[in-house]
Amino acid sequence: MDRKIDVKDVTATKKAGRKTGKASVDRFDPSSTIYVRSVTGVYQRLRKFMGWFLLLLFIALPLIPWNGHQAVLLDIEHNRYHIFNLTIFPQDLTLLAWIFIIAAFALFFFTTYLGRVWCGYTCPQTVWTFIFIWFEELFEGKANKRKRLDESPWDANKLWRKTAKHASWWVVSLLTGLAFASYFVPVKELYVSFFTFSSSFALTFWVLFFATCTYINAGWMRAIVCTHMCPYARFQSSMFDKDTFIVGYDAKRGENRGPRSRKADPKELGLGDCIDCDLCVQVCPTGIDIRDGLQYECINCGACIDACDQTMERMGYAKGLISYTTEHKLKGEKTDVIRPKIIGYGVVLAIMCGLFVWNLLTIKSIGFEVLRDRNALYRVTDEGLVENAYTFKIINKTMLPQQYSLSVSGLPAPVWSGPSDISVAPGEVFTQPISIAVDPYELEKSIQVIQFKVQDSDSDEFIEQESRFFSESR
């Protein structure tokens, strides 16, 4: 029996690029330049507020003095990490794992609920890109002027404008590299040594490395990072559903699109509310046309919403032709905000946050480790006592000197050799060898389980460590 299967041609074709006068820019071509037009509005004010807040927070945190050190200092050289009153040592780095887990589930939760709000409002790539665009507009003008300037031959005007723009980019990039390095190197040491050219090669390299990355990413690559490099753009759709809030165009209301005068009745002309002004395309930092539907390049920044709302207001039409909406709402159906996926992510996120807080609150301000002498299980003293040697490693995780008392339990009448009261400096890893001797006739077993205890002399906080005491077989 001869059966034929119809074949459908699904060859991928590129969508039309954004309109910029007579030419069209191919957003799939990394070499194409996207001239982003500035726009104001509710969402752009929110984006700028979030951007400036996070930028200032990023710069200011290492500059805040806190109990004799900077508020945040990740001291890799000495293996201790200061975060305000908390000092974290490598033994407590399970906290880092909790932070990564919380960040992952927070990403799932907010992406399922609000789409790519991270990309549009808080992503460093977005924040720094808009800062660089601001300097571009300052020295080269609006989008059309920048395009004409790039197409014009080199002259004195173009030279000084380009030089001023790139110089400002490098200043911002260098400050970004220094701000990043200040999380790992004390601020005073960092800035004094760097600007007096006395910093180490490693420090200079990393500052310049991050400055160069900032300059390239925010100045030259921009949307290429979002469209070609960022993995989030590729897998975010797996977290979307038809109730996820996305930037969407209401095609039922907007089509057929076309220009018209403000006084004309669109219904008489057979037109929808979209006047085909292309402002939504011109303000998009990734160069997409939201009217073609949701695309993975969309970062949910809301620039097209603000541009369209302004156009609708000038035309006397209702706002919201482009808005934060859902697929269900665009089809005239009900949006389910509370749904099993959201509840599941929310519950897991709450549990992870609770476990993180519990782990954080139960961190001891004392770190304690006992090492037995591996050269000999035991030795017999001149008095006939059995002696075991140990080495204590005690960490003071506070920012003040501490007095600790040492003791042992689980042995009958132990003879302690070594100091039982010690002083440990802030953040110091204190090493103390001691030995314990016992009359062998008092021991019931050749291997005795014992407990060493370190207690803060000024508080009730203590920590215990189990070990073994070896003696002659009986």
Image (cartoon, helix red, strand yellow):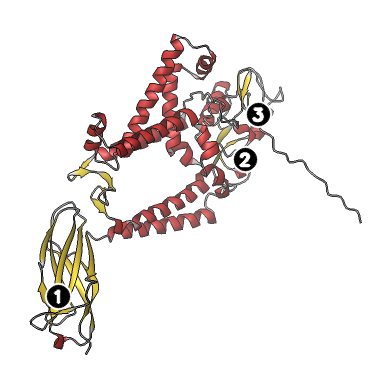
Please tell me how crowded label 2 is: few (under 14), some (14-19), or many (20+) other residues with Cα within 10 Å: some
**Does residue 129 appear anywhere in the picture?**
no
Labelled pair 2, 1 in contact (Cβ < 8 Å):
no
Please tell me how crowded label 1 is: few (under 14), some (14-19), or many (20+) other residues with Cα within 10 Å: some
Q: Position of residue 260 (x, y in %)?
A: 65, 19
Labelled pair 3, 1 in contact (Cβ < 8 Å):
no
> Tag 2: residue type?
Leu
* Residue 23 higher or lower than 254, as above or below: above
Question: Which structural element holds mark 2?
Answer: helix
> Tag 3: residue type?
Ala
Q: Nearer the viewer, residue 250 or 146?
A: 146
Q: How many marks?
A: 3
Q: Position of residue 167 (x, y in %)?
A: 38, 22
Q: Which residue is mark 1?
A: 436
> Tag 1: residue type?
Ile
Q: Which residue is mark 2?
A: 330
Q: Earlier in the sequence, mark 3 or mark 1?
A: 3
Instruction: Identify the residue at horizontal 57%, vertical 33% (top origin).
Output: 322
Answer with the quarter of the image where residue 123 lies. Answer: top left
Instruction: Identify the residue at horizontal 42%, vertical 30% (top origin).
Output: 215
**Does residue 399 appear anywhere in the picture?**
yes
Q: Which residue is mark 3?
A: 16
Q: Earlier in the sequence, mark 2 or mark 3?
A: 3
Question: Which structural element holds mark 3?
Answer: loop
Q: Position of residue 380 (x, y in %)?
A: 14, 81
On screen, residue 26 versus residue 345, left or right, reads right
Q: Earlier in the sequence, mark 2 or mark 1?
A: 2
Answer with the quarter of the image where residue 61 lies. Answer: top left
Mark nearest the camera among 3 and 1 is 1
Q: CA distance from mark 3 to mark 1?
A: 82 Å
Answer with the quarter of the image where residue 138 lies. Answer: top left
Question: Which structural element holds mark 1?
Answer: strand
